[in-house]
Image: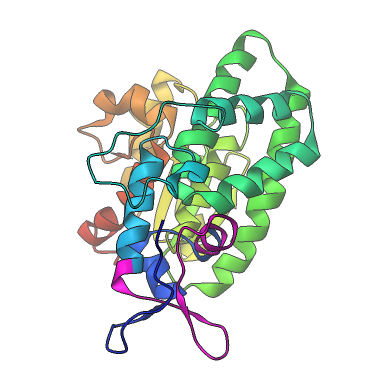
Amino acid sequence: MSIKATHPPDTPLYPIREVSRLTGVNSVTLRAWERRYGLIRPKRTPKGHRLYAQDDITRIERILQWLNRGVPVSQVVDLLDQPETVEAPAPNAGDWISQRQQLQLAIEALDLPRLETLYYQSLALYPLSTAVSELWQPVILALETKWTIQPDILARRTLEAFLRSQVGTRLHYANQATRGPLLLLTAMPDDQGPLWVLMVALMASEQGYRIQMFDHTLPLEALPQAVTRLHASMVLLTSGQRESDSYIHTALPNAAEALSVPLGICGEVARLRDRELRDSPVHTLGDELPQAIARLRPLLRESGVL
């Protein structure tokens, strides 16, 4: 393994905030990759601030490629200097299946210390989009499917309370640090709780949006006033359920028509009802949350909000 600790004097150098913007990897994760695994080694200013060269950025992009192929972060360091054609190693105890099992067991056992450890570990070692799409979203889907057959209201409410606290803290500081468009997030009537809203809020905040989150359903007739009074740029509704036909076919399109800003839906409802809403004023953004959030900015530009 070889990581250059220094760069030629004429090499352009970028601060960690700019590298985070260019790669989509937050600064906490970049620091963890450096400190825990030696994956990158940026140059330091006399005051200790990190500066990254283009070869560091290229290396980060290669790290992302391996992670997206399912390689545990602990194994990536041994692969970075291999030829580009090298195959990913076979799954082991560090793969996504194992991590999902650990997370689900912690939730069902009401093991809050373990849950907190897994939460911070996932956000520190992986880009948020990877942590959500490969770990948190699959676990929430698996649990909601299981809870439909074998309800466990205590485990559900414990997970909701944990994520509400963690995500709420992040939103508080993130909203103060950005001037991005304000998204109004709320759940649909048949959703069982705020799990989807919390995941969407986490993803959207990471992408520079300000978030006004309601973990209880906001009535559709209240949306125009909420948009006006909160100066929202978009309304985003989530659900892990199919929702009723009358809500999808009539109430939701009527609500979208009454708004001065776009109305979008994401989560399982967007996958289940996509075909029925294609010719309506409702924007279906999909059930894969990172991709759904990535579609927001083009939609806001097309709608003239940005």
Q: In the depicted view, which residue is nearer to us: 227 or 8? A: 8
**Above or below for 303 versus 159:** below
Look at the image and name its color scheme: rainbow
Residue 50 in picture, x, y percent from top left = 49, 78
The answer to whether residue 191 is seen in the rendering is no
**Above or below for 54 versus 209:** below
Name of the residue lying farthest toward the top = 149
Residue drawn 55% across the image and 57% down it: 212
Residues rendered magenta in the picture:
30-55
Q: In the depicted view, which residue is nearer to us: 118 or 185? A: 118
Of the 4 image quadrants, the one containing the N terminus is: bottom left
Residue drawn 24% across the image and 61% down it: 301
Residue 47 magenta = yes
Question: How many circles with numbers are drawn on the protein?
Answer: 0
Residue 116 in picture, x, y percent from top left = 72, 44
Q: In the depicted view, which residue is nearer to us: 54 or 260? A: 54
**Above or below for 258 versus 34:** above
Of the 4 image quadrants, the one containing the C terminus is: bottom left
Residue 252 figure quarter: top left
Q: In the depicted view, which residue is nearer to us: 281 or 44? A: 44
Residue 173 in picture, x, y percent from top left = 62, 68
Residue drawn 75% across the image and 37% down it: 114
Residue 237 in picture, x, y percent from top left = 46, 41
Residue 138 magenta = no
Residue drawn 44% across the image and 21% down it: 242
The answer to whether residue 165 is seen in the rendering is yes
